[in-house]
Image: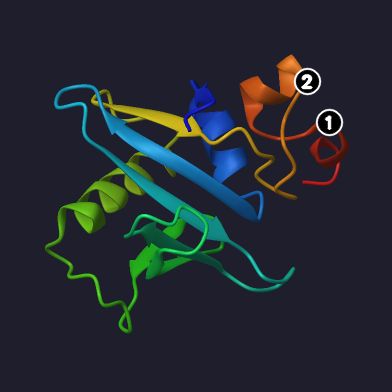
Amino acid sequence: MMSGMLETPEKVLEFALAGNATFTLKSKISGLHMTYRIRKPGDESPHFVALMSGPDNEGSYQYLGTIFSGKVYKHGAKSRISLEAPSEKVFNQFWAAISQNRIPAYLEVWHEGKCGRCGRKLTVPESIATGIGPICDGRI
């Protein structure tokens, strides 16, 4: 379920790096979409990127790559998803743009209606706009 579109690069970056973010990239041209999850297991660890690859939107994810220092994305050597796969190419282009403070013109970024940090359902209108709940907003 796509609950909120993240409309600025700042909001996208804050949400994506919050630690437990699930979001969908939707092509404005084709209408096709791909869902990704970015998690950070600990304070000092990098962020791990996974692609939703099956019907279970909670458990059907495959490792795609790693984001280091909140900026640099590298495709994972242990990823079963090819460097040539559309899902890899789209994420790579998306992350290159976001890390330079822009959203690719052909993409929309949607969060699933849950806080990108703790995963709780968002109900406050301001939180739905940012993808970060009011309690977590001060801790990111």
Residue 118 placement, left or right of 25: right
Q: Which numbered circle lies on residue 124? A: 2
Q: Which numbered circle lies on residue 99? A: none
Q: Which residue is drawn at 64% across and 73% down?
A: 45
Which of 87 and 53 lies nearest the eye of the viewer?
53
Colour approach in the figure: rainbow
Which of 56 and 135 lies nearest the eye of the viewer?
56
Residue 94 placement, left or right of 131: left
Q: Residue at x 43, y 57 (%)?
A: 56
Q: Quadrant of residue 134?
A: top right
Circle 1 residue = 134
Determine the residue located farthest toward the bottom in the rendered image: 78
SS under mark 2: loop
Residue 61 placement, left or right of 46: left
Q: In this view, does 122 lie above or below 65?
A: above
Q: In this view, does 100 lie above or below 106?
A: below
Looking at the rendered structure, the kind of residue marked 1 is Pro
Looking at the rendered structure, the kind of residue marked 2 is Val
- Residue 64 in percent (x, y) is at 35, 67
Going from N to C along the chain, the mark reached first, 1 or 2, is 2
Q: Quadrant of residue 104?
A: top left
Which of 132 and 114 lies nearest the eye of the viewer?
114
Q: Residue at x 88, y 37 (%)?
A: 135
Residue 74 placement, left or right of 101: left
